[in-house]
């Protein structure tokens, strides 16, 4: 019973995260460029390194 | 490319969920767009966009490398060159759009596509009774001014079209566009972004480099100037007007000859009749559409749909002529009375 409740909670939580802002998980792309898939993390790295950002928006699903 | 990319923090956003659409504002009918910016979200350049005839008209390695080098130089100088981007705008995400709450559950993994953002805005406008078909053309390509930009040096005018606003204002092939309405530009994407801010009808002031001189030229843009010639590639067109309710493919010149049709004649072989209105009109798989709403010239099925979306209203009726077993059969196609619910 507890296990079933746990599974249901996970499903509901997963749905809620998807439906309200968290969005789907990134699908890493292969290639020579090292991509960051989290925009806020990208901003943090840019600030830390002093580099500009190259932000690509590409629907890949 | 990879070596140059190491001088940037490369961020890849694969869905619009949670993306600040006040910062990442672009033509959401596109499936690819890039922004060059600093950590404070000051935008150096926008890279991407297209002319109607080719999805990759201004996407190529040479122009991307060129833009990356120019951005690195701007970044080194510490200069923010686009006044409109100086103050980072407040965060607004697609999930804030009321219609998006209805769209998200319909998408696998809840993934918001770029065109979903524009779609949600159009549907919201429709519900608030302020939808106009022109809203599809928010981001006009530079060809709407009457200029063809070089694919690599994207500020360089390759050709000026006859009888266009650009020709009337005196623009010439070889001119380089440096500034649009006070904003320095580097790319096709920058120019398109600035054009998106120009009213319809309106005026746009360009600062041009011609040989060694810098001159200013004002273009007067007539009503409807943002409407491009062939927007049939746009994903959101179906939200502003009714469609035909069937799908098909254009016949080859040889197939047309066999049916006694001219090479430039409309000839679309129907492969799927999915709309109840098209079924009710009597359109069948295997029919060859040779006339629709008075149009008889060669076009693709997407262009045929685009014609209806942009020129017809919900509830209109149009004529269709089909070839069926060598007989020309005139039909009347009643278009859907109202738009479909959110898809």
Image (tube, rainbow, N blue to C red):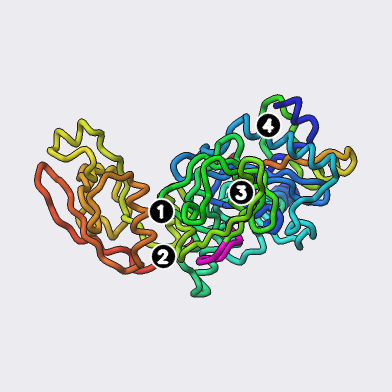
The residue identified by callout 2 is: B339
Q: Which residues fall within the magenta stretch?
A: B194-203
Disc 1 residue crowd, few under 14, some 14–19, many 20+, Cα 10 Å: few
According to the picture, the residue beneath numbered tag 1 turns out to be: B163
Secondary structure under tag 2 reads loop
- CB of mark 4 within 8 Å of CB of mark 3? no
B301 vs B207, left or right, is left
Left or right of B261? Residue B204 is: right
Count of numbered circles in the view: 4
Between marks 4 and 3 in the image, the one whose residue lies nearer the viewer? 4
At a point 76% along the width and 61% down the height, the residue shown is B89
Question: Distance from label 2 to label 1 (Cα)?
Answer: 37 Å
Q: Earlier in the sequence, mark 2 or mark 4?
A: 4
Question: Which quarter shows the C terminus of chain A?
Answer: top right
Please determine if labels 1 and 4 lie on a single subunit: yes
Which of the 4 image quarters holds residue B100?
A: bottom right
Rendered location of residue A31, percent (x, y): 68, 25
Q: Mark 4 points at which residue?
A: B65
> Which residue corresponds to mark 3?
B111
The answer for how far apart the CA atoms under marks 4 and 3 are is 30 Å
Residue at image coords 81%, 42%: B75
């Amino acid at each position: 019973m507890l296990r079933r409740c746990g599974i249901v909670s996970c499903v509901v939580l997963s749905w809620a995260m998807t439906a309200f802002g968290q969005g789907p998980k990134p699908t890493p792309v292969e290639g020579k460029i090292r991509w960051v898939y989290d925009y806020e993390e990208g901003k943090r790295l840019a600030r830390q390194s002093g580099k500009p950002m190259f932000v690509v928006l590409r629907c890949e699903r | 490319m990879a070596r140059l990319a190491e001088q940037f923090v490369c961020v890849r956003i694969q869905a619009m969920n949670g993306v600040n659409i006040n910062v990442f504002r672009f033509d959401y009918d596109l499936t690819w767009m890039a922004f060059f910016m600093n950590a404070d979200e000051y935008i150096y350049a926008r890279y991407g966009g297209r002319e109607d005839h080719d999805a990759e008209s201004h996407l190529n390695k040479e122009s991307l490398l060129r833009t990356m080098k120019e951005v690195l130089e701007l970044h080194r100088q510490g200069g923010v060159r686009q006044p409109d981007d100086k103050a980072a705008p407040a965060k607004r995400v697609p999930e804030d759009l009321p219609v998006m709450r209805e769209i998200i559950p319909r998408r696998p993994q809840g993934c918001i596509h770029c065109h979903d953002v524009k779609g949600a805005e159009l549907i919201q406008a429709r519900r608030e009774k302020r939808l106009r078909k022109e809203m599809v053309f928010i981001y006009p390509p530079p060809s709407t001014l009457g200029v063809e930009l070089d694919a690599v040096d994207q500020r360089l005018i390759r050709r000026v079209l006859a009888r266009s606003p650009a020709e009337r204002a005196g623009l010439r092939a070889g001119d380089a566009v440096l500034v649009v309405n006070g904003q320095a530009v580097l790319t096709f994407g920058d120019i398109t972004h600035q054009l998106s801010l120009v009213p319809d009808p309106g005026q746009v002031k360009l600062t041009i480099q011609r040989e060694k001189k810098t001159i200013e030229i004002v273009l007067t843009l007539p009503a409807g100037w943002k409407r491009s010639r062939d927007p049939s590639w746009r994903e959101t067109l179906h939200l502003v007007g009714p469609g035909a309710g069937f799908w098909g493919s254009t016949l080859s010149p040889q197939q047309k000859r066999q049916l006694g049709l001219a090479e430039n004649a409309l000839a679309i072989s129907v492969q799927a009749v999915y709309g109840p209105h098209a079924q009710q009109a009597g359109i069948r798989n295997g029919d060859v559409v040779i006339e629709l709403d008075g149009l008889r010239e060669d076009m693709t099925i997407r262009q045929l749909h685009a014609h209806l979306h942009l020129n017809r209203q919900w509830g209109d009726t149009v004529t269709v002529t089909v070839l069926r077993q060598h007989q020309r059969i005139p039909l009347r196609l009643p278009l859907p009375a109202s738009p479909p619910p959110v898809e």
